[in-house]
Amino acid sequence: MAALTISRRELTQRTAFSLLVLATAIVTVPVLFIIIYIVVNGAGALSWEFLTQAPSQAGKAGGIFPAIVGTFYLMLGTIIFSLPVGVLAGIYLTEYARANWLTRLINMAILNLAGVPSIVYGLFGLGLFVLAMKFGMSLLAASLTLACQALAMTITTSREAVIAVPREYREGSLAIGTTKWQTIRHVILPQALPGVITGAILAMSRAAGETAPILVVGAAFILPGLPTSPFDQFMALPYHLYTAAAHVPGMSKVTIWGIALVLLVVVLSFNSLAVFIRIRVRQRRFGS
Amino acid sequence: MAIASAGLSKSLRRRWRFSEKLIESFILLNGLLAIIVLLGVLFLLLREGLPAFAYTSPWQFFFGTRWYPVSEPPTFGILSFFMATLWVTLIATAIAVPLGVGCAAYLAEVAPASVRETVKPIVELLAGIPSIVMGLIGLLLLSPLVQGLFNLNTGLCGLTAAIMLAMMSLPIIVTVSEDALRAVPKEFREASYALGATQWETVWHVCLPGALSGIAAAIMLGVGRAIGETMTVLMVAGGALAVPYAPTQPMMPMTAAIASGIGNAVRGGPQYQALFAIALLLFLMTFAVNLVADRVLERQKRKFAR
Amino acid sequence: MNMNHALLNNRAAHNNETKLKTEQVSLFYGTFQALRNISLDIREKAITAIIGPSGCGKSSFLRLFNRMNDLIIGARVDGRVVIDDTNIYDRDIDVVELRKRVGMVFQKPNPFPMSVLENVAFGPRRHGKKNRHELEGIVERSLRQAALWDEVKDKLGQSALALSGGQQQRLCIARVLAVEPEVILMDEPCSALDPIATLRIEDLMRSLSSDYTIVIVTHNMQQAARVSDMAAFLMMEKDRAGILVEYGPTSQIFTNPQDKRTEDYITGRFG
Ligand SMILES: Nc1ncnc2c1ncn2[C@@H]1O[C@H](COP(=O)(O)OP(=O)(O)OP(=O)(O)O)[C@@H](O)[C@H]1O
Ligand SMILES: [Mg+2]
């Protein structure tokens, strides 16, 4: 009898664990499938011409060079507008803020900024940067919009990086009569830099893949040339992919998967770079 | 000596460090920026969205089923969009929660380190795939599958969108649930084993209940993600304007309605304002979900804090 | 007692000026009182040791003199702390300027993750010295003063974190010396070091005491006896607030304490 009970419990456990393994497999296998599928189907489109030429015949021929360039401009613009601000906000929260209602309010705001849907950021950018500030449908307006969206991330990652700097360094610096800002500038920031950069790269990677905001703020499907000023319209990979897939009849599948592959490579290589830096920093901090 | 001390005491008086003060105020300003942006978003949505109610009563807006932006006079009823969002979010959550929590439980409690080291990067990878790419997968690969499986007229429907959304909310559900499970103190598990419980009984009766509020927060964050996701539902959900009665119907969630309408809307016109009103609703919904999730998460953290 | 009386007694007072003093100082962390009504005169160019049981407020007391407690939210000071003629808790005191004059060395060596040279040059640089030649001069002088020059003169460009613990602590002392303070506070500067490194730091303290006013917190009775000219014994009252029990020349505190509680502590720890 006793033996029977135990084996039933054992059976329950085995069944349960198999289900957990099954869940894990259902979570992970499709991811690998997606990646492999895109690589396999998109690789055929890749060529020197595809990567370096402008599109022609409504994107059915030619390449995606302007979209690649536009995406890099967007990543750059996003980080230019969101990183300094994010770092300073992170510094404020760790070095200056007291534990009071204002700080709680700021933290709540950051949390909610991270949760605002991207399309809502798009409308915000349209209303504020495109229309009210009259930047028009431009690289500048889109960068600012994406920067607002990236803000939550740059603030949080900078804050974590600054918090991780040991207190001893702050005390050592302050104790020889440096000002608070000197301590931050010359001791804390250099130490926090790898963490800050990791966050920045992640934010850039995210910006590269965003579609909804730039759809609203005005990316173009086809443009004759590259943008020459921040006030120019621009092409971007995700928007180009969207239009090619959803709005151009008769678009070849190979081209579509090719664009997806390029976008994926840009986004995932930035992600891996961030992970790489994070691991390196951890090794350096705990290794020696 | 006296002279020296006098000199010293004089120089100890506070100096006006102008640049330091300037920098400090500037840093404070940046610290406030999160609040400024959030309020800015809210303000803009209110300013552009509220005038919509001059054309439509709130009742008509929320419960009207007809969205005729260009007829004279225009009608803006968003019930079908709202229902569509509800359908896809509910189904996505129903799919993602068992998978996500199961995966998290496996990673946190059962999996050997080597499996965990392989699975976690894959989950991170999933989090990194842009939503437009997921939309593409739904559009080109999943929808024919769903169409064939359920014998539908079109595979572009709520269900297909929901499956893609489920995938997209999995990373946050897995990560936050796993953290919550890990936060359950080791002593609880040991006590359970000491009473003769099996590993699974310990997971089921001790770890999962202990991490419940964290898992609840994870689910809410996943829901927030699903509500706000745009590109996938725009490409995959089918875009029909009628109120959806079944998940297998084509439908138009709120985010998709905004994205597909904003390009044609006359700036400052009635449709433009109505779209901003939808965005306002969306903003408030995700705001509420995130706020509650944060509260729950805080409680979870405090539970085991010693 | 296996103590060397000659060593204790040779601390002839060479200077009787008061450099620092506390007048009825109380320190609170929020509602908790960490120090109660402490009045103490600290002599210029001498070494004053603060001793007492763990948690009695020695570190807190030391950190009064460079207002390091300001960094702790909720910390409050009553009474006066005077350097020369100035109450450093006056409202118009410049804390940055104060900390230039009152340097501090911590329990755990905390060199910055920079080169040896940059560590020592850090303070002077922040205080506006930019000339490379001048900075190098300051670095060499400070390292020599800290008895570290010979050991590091060939690796000034290397990371300070590669030095041994004792070298790191002397580097931290050099870093303080480079800003030419008048007072040096040391909070258990040897507690993380081995005995040989400890002796080197003690030698260093003795040699610095002819130019600097030094206040040191230590748990090590032998160390207090070996290096200090004056000693103050702190202790906790029932509510855990620290009070000053006895203060006097080190030889007297260790050989002929006036207070029963000092004697108990000294003999319990020392005999
Ligand atoms: N930041 C703080 N906030 C609240 N209480 C504190 C803080 N720092 C110290 N205390 C309390 O003040 C009292 C004195 O602490 P302090 O560190 O000055 O003692 P100490 O004599 O240096 O101890 P030790 O010999 O262990 O270093 C202790 O009861 C301690 O708990
Ligand atoms: Mg101490």
Image: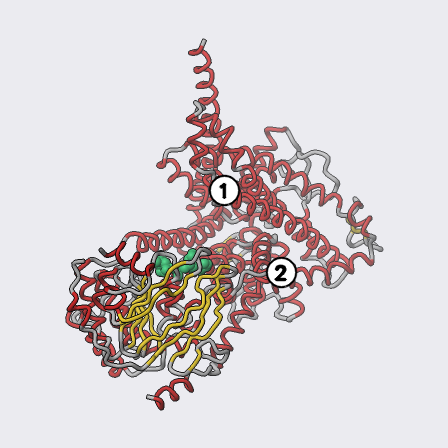
Eye-nearest disc, 2 or 1: 1
- x and y, in percent, of residue C266 in the image: 27, 59
Task: Classify the position of the N terminus of chain B by image quarter.
Answer: bottom left
Quarter residue C56 falls in? bottom left
What is the chain identity of the residue bearing mark 1? B
Label 1 CB-ligand 1 distance < 8 A: no
The x and y percentages for residue B160 are: 60, 37
Q: Badge 2 is on which residue? A: B38
- Whether residue C112 is visible to the viewer of this picture, yes or no, is no
C251 and B86: which is toward the camera: C251
Crowding at label 2, few (<14), some or many (≥20) Cα neighbours within 10 Å? Answer: some
Residue at x-position 30% and y-position 55%: A284
Query: In the rendered structure, the residue with mark 2 lies on which chain?
Result: B
Q: Amino acid at mark 2?
A: Leu
Q: Which of the 4 image quarters holds residue A2?
A: top left
Placement of A51 over or under A16, stated as above or below: below
Mark yes or no: residue C166 visible. yes
Q: Are marks 2 and 1 on the same chain?
A: yes
Q: Quarter containing ligand 2?
A: bottom left
Disc 1 target residue = B304
Viewer-side residue, C182 vs A123: C182
Which dot marks residue C205? none
Query: Residue placed at 48% from the left, 64% from the top?
Result: C28
Using the image, determine if residue A40 lies above or below residue B50.
above
Image-based side of C58 in relation to C172, left or right: right
Give the alpha-carbon distance from disc 2 to disc 1, as whole Å.
32 Å
